[in-house]
Image (cartoon, rainbow, N blue to C red):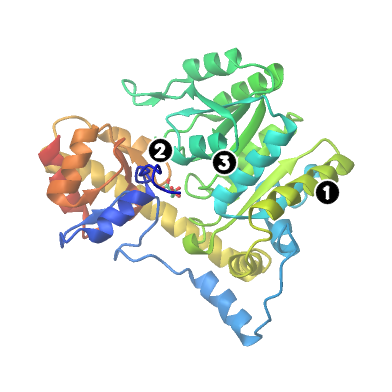
Amino acid sequence: LFSAVEMAPRDPILGLNEQFNADNNPNKVNLGVGVYFDDNGKLPLLQCVQAAEKTMMATPTARGYLPIDGIVAYDNAVKALVFGADSDVVKSGRVSTVQAIGGTGGLKIGADFLKKVSPKAKVLISDPSWENHRAIFVNAGFEVDSYAYYDAAKRGVNFEGMLTSLNAAEPGTIVVLHACCHNPTGYDITDDQWDQVIAVVKDKGLTAFLDMAYQGFGHGIAEDGAVIGKFVAAGLNIFVSTSFSKSFSLYGERVGALSVVASDKEEASRVLSQLKIAIRTNYSNPPIHGGAVVAAVLNNPELRAQWEQELAEMRVRIKAMRQKLVDGLKAAGVQQDMGFITSQIGMFSYSGLTKDQMVRLRSEFGVYGTDTGRMCVAALNSKNIDYVCAAIAKVV
Ligand code: LMR
């Protein structure tokens, strides 16, 4: 049965974790996967999460099946966070939100539903994009192409190219957009540029699918989420996948959501019924714990304030590490100006290093980033920064 089964390549991101774990180098540093570590190199367990769990443990509850679309209080909290509790779109019942297995699950449920609604549509992802975007939409049966995004020479966004690509897309094309903290480049478009993108999406009849896995890691929770409000204000039917993996440091709980904005309440209920079929046929219904923790935090003003504070600390520390990286590289003797690292945002820096240089970093120094040159700045700390800078200086 399996004699002709080919060996699949390692996952370009999570595969690095396997390699990292097997590496005996005592100085090894994992800048591969997008995970935040504190200044002691520890994965944080947020205080707000601990407080919510303590309360939950005090009244242990049995674990029945959740509804297919998840915990109601969770779905409502996501709607409020992403669209605003008092927004017209939420109050008028136009948003269908379902709990999903991480942001990846939200993308997959949305992709499966879209395959039913627009079976012939093409999907466009940014060039480059998170590696899994292409795979998720290809596996859902779509033809996936890309729109121009990164300009290596300019170290920024090729916005003219992006608009040209979007303008050339067939009506109905599904466009996967990074709402904030573009993964992998770290370069976002400006407010004014978002307005221009929205105008093209509207004029050309494209379908926007916003991936918002890093809300709160750019400029702030509200600031990063503002782009969603712009799409809604333009009267567009959009898809938004969200994730609490990073913002709650709940990676392994797989807690995310998919929200779809319909034209009216009745349409939204039909959309929801179809999303439930996509969930039921993929994994039946979501797990309880992560969603219950996030709902408990978001729906309690004190815990919510604590979460915002803890998320702000992560955001601020990452920014400080960006500056330390720029200074450290200079001090380590890197000639070229690496100042662009501080104009990037979110967890990642697209370093401009080549595949060969990234492979050398890994094999000679145990410093792990992706082959594309992406490094997770959120895993740098005051103890490993000098080592990382010295290693990079040796390979460039
Ligand atoms: C990343 O890009 O490193 C993260 O989103 C983790 C993942 O699932 O790839």
Does residue 230 appear to the left or right of 381 in the view shown?
Answer: right
List x then y, in percent, for residue 218.
Answer: 48, 44
| Residue farthest right in this picture | 266
| Residue farthest bottom in this picture | 58
Q: Would residue 237 be seen by someone viewing this image from the given angle?
A: no
At label 1, which amino acid type do we have? Lys
Give the structural element (helix, strand or loop) at label 3. strand
Gap in angstroms between the C-alphas marked 1 and 3: 23 Å
Q: Is residue 305 above or below residue 221?
A: below
Nearest to the eye among marks 1 and 3: give it: 3
At label 2, which amino acid type do we have? Pro
Mark 2 — residue?
184
**Which quadrant holds residue 351?**
top left
**Which quadrant holds residue 72?**
bottom right
Nearest to the eye among marks 2 and 1: give it: 2
List x then y, in percent, for residue 23.
Answer: 20, 58
Mark 1 — residue?
91
**What residue is shown at x 47% (from left), y 49% (from top)?**
217
Q: Which mark is residue 211?
A: 3
Q: Nearer the viewer, residue 115 or 248?
A: 115
List x then y, in percent, for residue 68.
Answer: 73, 59
